[in-house]
Amino acid sequence: MDTSSIVFPFHVFDQEADFSIVQRRLPHWSQAGAICFITWRTDDSLPKSVLDEWHNNRSKWLGDLGIDPTSKRWREDLQLLDSAKYQEFLSIFWNRWHDELDACHGACVLRQPELAKIVESSLHYFDNDRYLLLEFIVMPNHVHIMAAFPDEHAMLAQCESWKHFTATQINKRLKRRDRFWQKDAFDHLVRSERQFEYLRHYIADNPKKAGLKLGEYLHFSQNIST
């Protein structure tokens, strides 16, 4: 891959290179320069009944493979599965999760252009400085981002900064003090150029899949050749 303005080398996840597992409330895999796919969702984006069913089904699937779903290491163990099983997990649970987000549960305040632009401006602010922004979309109740970061801890630190700033600014506009984003983002390292291209198309097609009209979302795509 190449682009006209890269501040550091970026790449898909390299299993042979050094990587780290950063512990927060959930563990996160990270690797210097590796492209991450990140999803944030608003606090009201998924009803409890949907979440309960999803977690129960995921727990059964993991348990059938000998992975303890209550362990703090379950994501680490999932990443160590063979490629076919990992893809099966994504096709079942990733798709269901994102289908529910696209159903636009909750107040969907990011449908308002002036609020979506707060997120857009924040994502662009340190682009080509602290990170390389490759693709993002601001949907009514969630955000998808693909970006690369220069070191192992930069992704989590930057996500915390983005989320804190945007939540503060959006709540100020809405005249409220409620929690805006769910605490943990969904993130994983992009494993191949094929997956990278799939995720780029997924992000671009997200508004059509969710039945949104022009003006109800914000999409950005970096011009990258592979």
Image: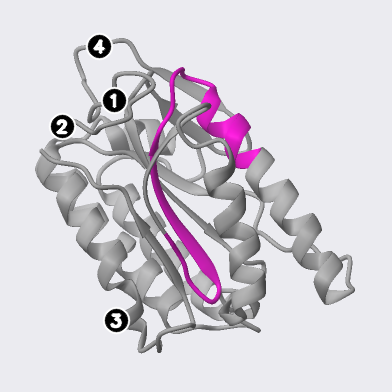
For mark 3, give the secondary structure.
helix
Residue 178 shown left or right of residue 104 in the figure: right
- The stretch of residues the image draws in magenta is 137-160
- Residue 212 within the segment the image draws in magenta: no
* Amino acid at circle 2: Met
State the quadrant of the N terminus: top left
Q: Are marks 2 and 4 in contact (CB under 8 Å)?
A: no
Front residue of 132 and 91: 132
Q: What residue is drawn where x is 53% and y is 46%?
A: 124
Q: Are marks 1 and 4 in contact (CB under 8 Å)?
A: no
Front residue of 194 and 1: 1
Considering only vertical position in the picture, is 91 above or below 209?
A: above
Residue 183 shown left or right of residue 74 in the figure: right
The image's mark for residue 10 is 1
In primary-sequence order, the first of circles 2 and 1 is 2
Q: Are marks 3 and 4 in contact (CB under 8 Å)?
A: no
Read off the residue under disc 3. Answer: 209
Give the foreground label among 3 and 2.
2
For mark 4, give the secondary structure.
loop
For mark 1, give the secondary structure.
loop
Task: For marks 3 and 4, give the CA distance.
Answer: 36 Å
Read off the residue under disc 4. Answer: 17
Task: For marks 3 and 2, give the CA distance.
Answer: 28 Å
Considering only vertical position in the picture, is 100 above or below 197?
A: below
* Amino acid at circle 3: Lys
Task: For marks 1 and 4, give the CA distance.
Answer: 13 Å
Read off the residue under disc 2. Answer: 1
Q: What residue is drawn where x is 33% and y is 26%?
A: 6
